[in-house]
Amino acid sequence: MTVIGAVDVEAERLWFDISANGTAYLATLIPFGPTGKENKLFRVDLEGGALEEVGDIAPPSGSSFLSGIAVAPPGLGGGVIEVPALSRFGIGLFALALCAAALRRSARRRGGAAS
């Protein structure tokens, strides 16, 4: 293990993992304003320790919180998906896809009950 340097981000909590290809990630819980908090994901340069912000992840709420991260190794099959840090647009598209799937399932159940 080699110390690269200090983490240059003011955060309440930090989580770290390195992918199979050597890309390092750091998830953080960052306080802002009087009571706000946000989780951010960063790529970490393992040579010099520089951070590159990837984006917001897992918005904290009263009932849920981020408790760690793990980068899945390649080849784990269909049960593992890559979830990039989502923008507000990406989260909206994901919610729309979930609603469409729920409506489709509901329509199938109603159609099956009538037969």
Image (tube, rainbow, N blue to C red):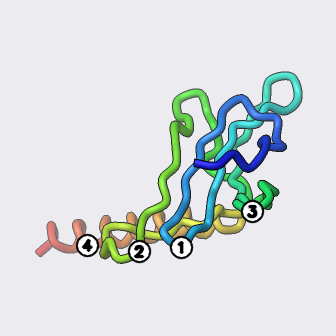
For marks 2 and 4 on the same chain, the one whose residue lies earlier in the sequence: 2
For the residues labelled 2 and 3, the Cα–Cα distance comes to: 23 Å
For the residues labelled 1 and 3, the Cα–Cα distance comes to: 15 Å
Residue placed at 55% from the left, 53% from the top? 17
Name above or below for residue 83 compared with residue 5: below
Q: Position of residue 32 (x, y in %)?
A: 84, 33
Nearest to the eye among marks 2 and 4: give it. Answer: 2
Instruction: Identify the residue under disc 3.
Output: 47
**Figure quadrant of the C terminus:** bottom left
Q: Position of residue 107 (x, y in %)?
A: 31, 71
Instruction: Identify the residue under disc 1.
Output: 21
For marks 2 and 1 on the same chain, the one whose residue lies earlier in the sequence: 1
For marks 4 and 1 on the same chain, the one whose residue lies earlier in the sequence: 1
The disc labelled 3 sits on which kind of residue?
Answer: Glu
Front one among 31 and 47: 47
Nearest to the eye among marks 2 and 3: give it. Answer: 3
Mark 2 and mark 4 in contact? Answer it, CB < 8 Å. Answer: no
For the residues labelled 2 and 4, the Cα–Cα distance comes to: 35 Å
